Amino acid sequence: MRLSASRNRVRRVTPRIERYNTVIVGGGQAGLAIGQQLAARDIDSVILDAELRVGDTWRRRWDSLRLFTPAAFSGLPDMVFPAPPGHLPDKDEVADYLERYAERFDLPVRPNTTVRAVRRNAARFEIDTGDITFEADNVIVATGALQRPNIPLVSAGFDPSIHQLHSSEYRSPFDLPDGPVLVVGAGSSGTLLALELARFRKVWLAGPDTGDLPRRILGRDLFNWIWPVMTRATRDTRFGAWLRNRAVRGGDTRIGIPEHALSEVGIVRIGRITDERGGWPTSDGAVLRPRTLLWCTGFVPDFDWINLPVFGSDGHPRHHRGVSEDIAGLYFLGLRFQHRMTSSLIGGVGLDARFIAEQIAQRAEVTAGI
């Protein structure tokens, strides 16, 4: 018996197309801040978020994580953080705050929506998510500063008995196998995790001293003094450029963790890990035999899904204050030191979001011929 031609025919499903003035990629703090700013200007937008729930990126971080910035400096536009001004919010408080923020301003978050590619056709941007293709006059990449974990190539040569993980995968000391831990990266995250782990086991902390600042000065939290300076220190000022270069070269300054606090709990400070011998990491010629190696080495850009010629040789977008230098209508938000030292922080991203929303509003007026 022959099957009919119609039964043999492969059915092709055409992706649904939705059109907006602006598509925001990323539903974290940056995406929510710009979504609120666009809504305040009656600009049609949608926020595409790969997470199932607003704030999930924060909920997955290590259990003891707290912000370095007090609640007074950790709010998004038009909604203060609901805690005493000096309180240091934990990661779940941050996640819940972001969720409430999206609900309060009725932001158009589309959860569980992963962007596969961003392209440009003759007139508009195309944002491919598989089942749906979004078209927009503007695209805002709000995926933030924490993208792809940066793990040095030397890690591939280490003995397989060493349990290696990045700080983004770490949750608790009790999830790690017994035995000594080598923490690589002596910035803020590395030193905090080294202190936590040193309560239970031997810890080596590898990397140069990034310096420290006290948590309180003259009875007030450090950020009461430095936040105004941080917001004024933009990339186009001499001081801002110096701060950015220092952060890129030397890592983040520790807050409230003096060097002696590390030695007092038995943490052994060592130099950089640049080589291996017999499958074991070495530092200054000495061979270390950790059971666990925790990489606190930050993140690198991950924009492979953006099929547009807008990046430099270092993988970072070419932009001025988040506005693409190559393609009109493309914007970035939440990048580290995007315009000022606070650009990637919850309490600082709002200023950049306001600037970008104004650029989009002006562009809409020009397009409309106003």
Image (cartoon, rainbow, N blue to C red):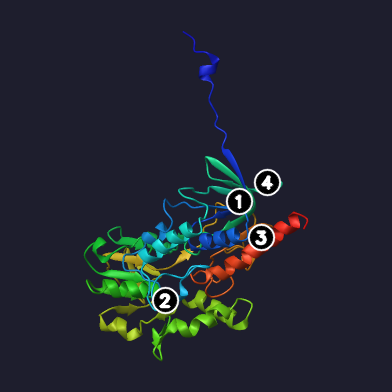
Spatial separation of the CA atoms under disc 2 and disc 3: 31 Å
Q: Kindly check if marks 3 and 1 are in contact, taking CB atoms under 8 A apart as contact.
A: no
The residue tagged 4 is 121
Disc 2/disc 4 C-alpha distance (Å) = 44 Å
> What's the residue at 57%, 34% (across, down)?
14
Q: Residues within 10 Å of mark 1 (few under 14, many from 20)?
A: few
Mark 2 falls on what kind of element? Answer: loop
Please state which of residues 324 and 359 is positioned toward the viewer in this rendering: 359
Label 4 element class: loop
Of the numbered discs in the image, which one, if any, rests on residue 70?
2
The reply to whether residue 118 is visible in this rendering is yes
Q: Residue at x 49, y 71 (%)?
A: 347
Amino acid marked by disc 2? Pro
Q: Which residue is the site of mark 1?
A: 307
Query: For the residues carrying marks 2 and 1, which lies nearer the camera in this image?
Result: 2
Which element type, helix, strand or loop, lies under badge 1?
loop
Query: Which of the two labelled residues, at mark 3 and mark 1, occupies the earlier sequence position?
Result: 1
The foreground one among 154 and 210 is 210
Q: CA distance from mark 4 to mark 3?
A: 19 Å
| Label 3 residue SS | helix
Q: How far apart are the alpha carbons under marks 3 and 1?
A: 21 Å
Image quadrant of residue 72? bottom left
Q: Is residue 43 left or right of residue 86?
A: right
Residue indicated by mark 3: 360
